[in-house]
Amino acid sequence: MKFLKPKNLTVKIGAIILLLGLLIAPSVQAIDLGIGYAENIGLASAGDEDIRDTAVGIIQYLLTFLGIIAVGIILYGGFVWMTAGGNEDRVAKAKKIITAGAIGLIIVISAFAITSFVIEMTENAINGGF
């Protein structure tokens, strides 16, 4: 059973994974990822969109996701408070959770507003007008 000791087993599994990785890597490089697929079927290619627009979309989706998480934290704090059953420690914990969620939501909304302002100002500066 010396073969199946945890230390030996970990090393052997790691070696097998490494060898499989080395064997599979050349075939992965030859895979057609379909980068030109959109152009082939008549859709707009990724090159048609400006990278700045893509970055703005990603930032806005990220901030929206963070806002949803902050609202979820506030709802969780309300759930903890409602199920506290008069226990002062749980009520205090719920208040801290709700406060942290509210602060997070304020930060996310502020970041969204600042980002929107900066994006609008840079677009106006690039396009030559206000």
Image (cartoon, rainbow, N blue to C red):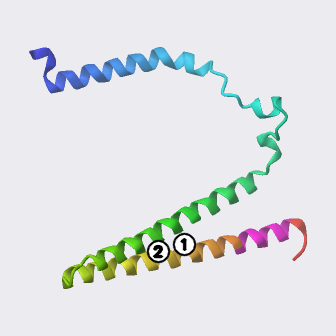
Point 51% across, 66% down: residue: 68
How many marks the image carries: the answer is: 2
* 60 in relation to 109, above or below: above
Mark 2 surroundings: few (<14), some (14-19) or many (≥20) residues within 10 A: some
Q: Which quadrant holds residue 40?
A: top right
Left or right relative to 40: residue 29: left
Point 26% across, 82% down: residue: 91
Q: Main secondary structure of the magenta part?
A: helix
Residue 24: % across, % down: 49, 17
Mark 1 surroundings: few (<14), some (14-19) or many (≥20) residues within 10 A: many
Q: Distance between the residues labelled 1 and 2?
A: 6 Å
The C terminus sits in image quarter: bottom right
Secondary structure state at the residue bearing disc 2: helix
Q: Which quadrant holds residue 82?
A: bottom left
**Labelled disc at residue 126:** none
Left or right relative to 124: residue 114: left
Disc 1, disc 2: CB below 8 Å? yes
**Labelled disc at residue 108:** 1
Left or right relative to 51: residue 73: left
Residue 28: % across, % down: 56, 21
Q: Residue at label 2? A: 104
Point 82% across, 33% down: residue: 39
Per the image, is 41 magenta?
no
Looking at the rendered structure, the kind of residue marked 1 is Val
Secondary structure state at the residue bearing disc 1: helix
* 123 in relation to 29, above or below: below
Q: Closest to the observer: 86 or 96?
A: 86
Residue 71: % across, % down: 47, 71
Residue 55: % across, % down: 68, 56
Which segment did they paint magenta? 117-126
Looking at the rendered structure, the kind of residue marked 2 is Gly
The N terminus sits in image quarter: top left
